[in-house]
Image (tube, grey):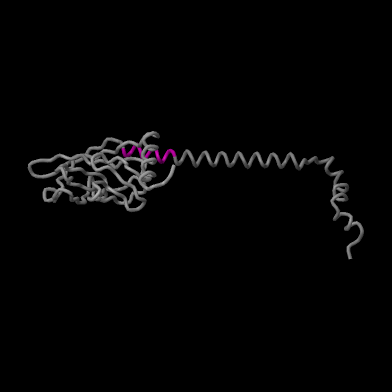
Amino acid sequence: MRDKATMQLSDETEVRRASAPYQRDFPYEREEEAQVARREFCRFLGFTSAALFLSAAGFALESYLSARREQPFQPQHIAGAEDLAPGEALNFRYPTERDSAILVHAEDGSFYAYGQKCTHLSCPVYYERGRGRLECPCHEGAFDLQTGRVLYGPPPRPLDRILLEVRDDGVWAVGRKAQGEESFGERLVRLTEGRRRSGCKM
């Protein structure tokens, strides 16, 4: 059975009274300490968030600059291009074996080529002949055939364009160009058009 002293110390008032001499000799303000701890925690969260943001921004900037950096490209004959009927497309690799691309022979006889990776999450795009445009099957993005610009969906920028030359011996890829991101106004117009197409109310 606990004695009276123990029982008294289990009461908050008695504990504070018993510890009063120690507090005078070694002052400790709980509320002030709690405020300091909260400030330190908030400062830590702020620094951590800023560091993560700067890291992500730096990575995105490096990727963007790398994509736009001028590189020397070797001309490459696109095998099979001369056999494409209007409205047909084929896949090829350019400028390296790791870079997939798509060539489209348009109904008017023109040729267009783009990097095949969607600029959203790198899913491969394909040519939708019935609609005359390039589409991404992953998240319903679509790109204009003649320019590579985003028609609707989540892609943030146009497809990378493959520069072409039509020569006597066929169609040649002679360069690859990353196209810039949309302005805020362009993106707003596109998203509005996308909602209108899908029947969503604004």
As for residue 60 lying within the magenta part, the answer is yes
Q: Quadrant of residue 115?
A: top left
Residue 186: x %, y % from top left = 36, 35
Relative to 167, residue 135 above or below? below
Question: Is 139 part of what is drawn in magenta?
Answer: no
Q: Residue at x 35, y 53 (%)?
A: 138
Residue at point 39%, 47% (across, down): 199
Of all residues, the one furthest to the right in this rendering is 4
Q: Pick the residue in front: 148 or 78.
A: 148
Residue 86 as seen in the image, left or right of residue 66:
left
Range of magenta residues: 57-67
**Would you say 182 lies left or right of 90 here?**
right
Q: Residue at x 47, y 38 (%)?
A: 54
Residue found 19% across the figure and 50% down from its top: 89
Q: Main secondary structure of the magenta part?
A: helix
x then y, percent, for residue 111: 17, 43
Residue ranking furthest to the left: 168
Q: Is residue 171 rendered to the left or right of residue 135?
A: left
**Residue 21: horizontal and vertical position, in percent?**
87, 43
The C terminus is located in which quarter?
A: top left
List x then y, in percent, for residue 65. Answer: 34, 36
* Residue found at the very far bottom of the displayed protein: 1
Q: Nearer the viewer, residue 144 or 200?
A: 200
Q: Nearer the viewer, residue 126 or 37?
A: 126
Task: Give the left or right position of residue 167, taking residue 21 as reference.
Answer: left
Q: Tally the marks.
A: 0
Which quadrant of the rendered structure holds the N terminus? bottom right
